[in-house]
Amino acid sequence: MEDQGLPLDRISNLPSNIAIAILTLMPIKDAFKTSILSQSWRYHCVDIPKLTFDYTFHASVARNYTCKGAHIVYLILLLHQGQILDFSFVNFRQQISRWEIDQIIIHLSRRAATLKKLTLCIDLRDHKLSLAFFKLQQLMFLKLQGCVFQPPVTYKGFSKLVTLSFNNVCITAEVFQRFISSCPLLKDFTLFGDESHLTGCWNSNILECLSSIDRLCTSSYPIKCFAKNVIPQKLPAPLILKHLHLVGASILREINLFSAICLVICSSPNIETFIMEHMHIPDRLITQAVPQTAINVTDEQWVILHHLRLIKMINFINRKAGMNFLKLMLAKSPMLKDVHIVIGKNVDIHDEIKMLKELLRYPRASTRAEIRFERL
């Protein structure tokens, strides 16, 4: 019988796997505080398989400690005893040295046999990842931001990688092609960067390296790079791409960019969703856009998009280039269900109504296609 008047202890005798599962759901700082709850919980925190050092963690460190967040991360890695399956470090408004980053990576490389997911957002654009990084051969998910990606010549790639995100990662076209070709299971790829990050000859050969990608999210600059060179009518082999998301594109101002986008879509017969976030163009610059008659994509250049279900245009304005593009998409997509138009801030209500009426008049291959409008 329980002692009368004593509080019931419901946590001390929880099974170890349940305690660790609870700690995994908590912010890392709070998880380590639980070591004072009871004798049996004292060492659970050093077995947490998921370590997340994000904005919340850094903000808490800045409020409550005199040392830097990187020092605490380093200490936790030294104390950690169990497997690390998922590690995330986001450098947030603090100075971090290259040595500190290298030490974190070296410690992770000692757990290379178990580490499956890695996020490193370090914002040291001139920092070359240490050789220890390329020992993480079990990675299935990798997100990098603000560093230099230059593997050794003997590097064989990440054979188990499925999801990859490069955000402002400095990489040459030659290294990129070699790297992507060494990741046979890669299906989900995000690439953001500009001319200061993506160097070398980025041409249509890069697209061929992405032939096995299922989902591609990219800024407009890589597409612009393809467009600087001779754009073929079609790629040697079709892409298996199902989901395409373009960010910061401006088909109003760049003819070749528009052609490159059409090449990607027409080379992807299995595409299911297409999302384009248009670059915002101030009113004073809209008149400087490509002449309305300059962009002409004909039916002969398009394939039937038998699998396309969703088209979403964000920051869309009523200009002939964009409207003609939508017209073709509607005419070539017999299974289309949803056309979601998010109107740009500089589109007035009269132009919006005009745009909607024009779209509703366009012939649609799918009788089920619903056109929805909303504002940013």
Image (tube, helix red, strand yellow):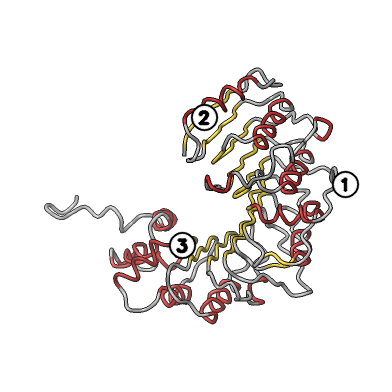
Q: Three-letter amino acid code at disc 3?
A: Thr
Secondary-structure class at tag 3? strand
Position above or below: 291 against 42: above
Q: Residue at x 71, y 23 (%)?
A: 334
- x and y, in percent, of residue 145 in the image: 57, 64
Q: Earlier in the sequence, mark 2 or mark 1?
A: 1
**Most distant residue in the bottom direction:** 99
Question: Which residue is labeled 3 in the image?
Answer: 52
Secondary-structure class at tag 1? loop
Q: Quadrant of residue 63?
A: bottom left
Q: Earlier in the sequence, mark 3 or mark 1?
A: 3
Q: For residue 352, which numbered disc appears in the image?
A: 2
Q: Few, some or many C-alpha atoms within 10 Å of disc 2 (few <14, some 14-19, many ≥20)? A: some
User: CA separation, marks 2 and 1?
Assistant: 40 Å
Q: Few, some or many C-alpha atoms within 10 Å of disc 1 (few <14, some 14-19, many ≥20)? A: few
Position above or below: 322 against 285: above
**Most distant residue in the left direction:** 5
Q: Few, some or many C-alpha atoms within 10 Å of disc 3 (few <14, some 14-19, many ≥20)? A: many
Q: Residue at x 18, y 54 (%)?
A: 7
Question: Which residue is labeled 1 in the image?
Answer: 236
Position above or below: 36 against 101: above
310 sits to left or right of 64: right
- x and y, in percent, of residue 224 in the image: 71, 54
Please tell me which residue lies in front, 106 or 187. 187
